Image (cartoon, rainbow, N blue to C red):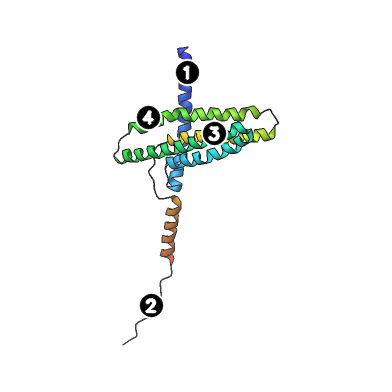
Amino acid sequence: MRIMRNIISKAYSALDEAIMKGVNASVGAYNWTTGRTEADLANKLLTVAPILESSGLVYHGHFGIVIIPFCLYLSHRFQKINNEIEDLEIRSFEKSLLDFRVELHKNNCKLGGPMFALISSLYFLPHISKRDADHAIADYSIAFGTTLRSFSFYVIRADYFPPRKSAIKKGLEKLAEIVESYKAPSIQPLPAPV
């Protein structure tokens, strides 16, 4: 039994490491392109998640309508936590230290990502063989919302990239410099001969 648990633990660790490698690359690309941080990206995912979840839950009637405020609360609460963690991360980054609260939160998020991924799969899987299109669309909407919520937990665990100037602004500034350097010199009148 112990050997089996160890194999499962190693397999999960390898999968989590591979996922986080991709997430770190994605967050780095997001930071380079927009100049924003992983908390900003995670919060954007948490903003869209309840919209998708709510559109699917409305189809389920009274039960779904009761859950919608809970989805909104979860997103709001996690966004607030993400902002607090980002503030702590910025302070620890500036001091070249690790903050225990940041690391504890990232460790706790190791559970949130897979948990919401599991919830998402529960909405995806029942419709593989069924043909009830309306019900399937509602459940797929919920599944996509919970998938985004799951991604937000992985994103907030990503390496910290400090805010920077976006690639678009850098490109526009470089373009302005090039345009300035190619401007035709103004014609100066020649001095009159004496």
Residue 81, numbered circle: none
Whole-percent x, y for residue 13 in the image: 45, 25
Q: Callout 3 environment at 10 Å: few (<14), some (14 to 19), or many (20+)?
A: many
Amino acid at dot 4:
Leu
Foreground: disc 4 or disc 2: 4
Helix, strand or loop at label 3? It is helix
**Label 2 belongs to which residue?**
188
Q: Are marks 2 and 3 in contact (CB under 8 Å)?
A: no
Sequence-wise first label, 3 or 4? 4
Give left or right: position of 70 versus 58: left
The residue at the point 51 percent across, 37 percent down is 72
Q: Position of residue 39 (x, y in %)?
A: 43, 40
Residue behind mark 4: 104
- Label 4's element? helix
Asked if one can make out residue 24 in the rendered structure from this viewpoint, the answer is no
> Of the residues tagged 1 and 3, which is closer to the observer?
3
Q: Marks 1 and 3, how far apart in space?
A: 28 Å
Q: Amino acid at mark 1?
A: Ile
Query: CA separation, marks 2 and 3?
Result: 67 Å
Give whichever of discs 2 and 1 has the lower sequence position.
1
Q: Quickly name the residue at label 3.
A: 146
Q: Nearer the viewer, residue 27 or 67?
A: 67
Q: Earlier in the sequence, mark 1 or mark 4?
A: 1
Q: Of discs 2 and 3, which sits in the foreground? A: 3
Q: Judge from the rendering whether residue 194 lies leftward or rightward of residue 22; answer left or right.
A: left
Q: Is residue 101 above or below residue 29?
A: above
**Residue located 49% across and 36% down the image:** 73
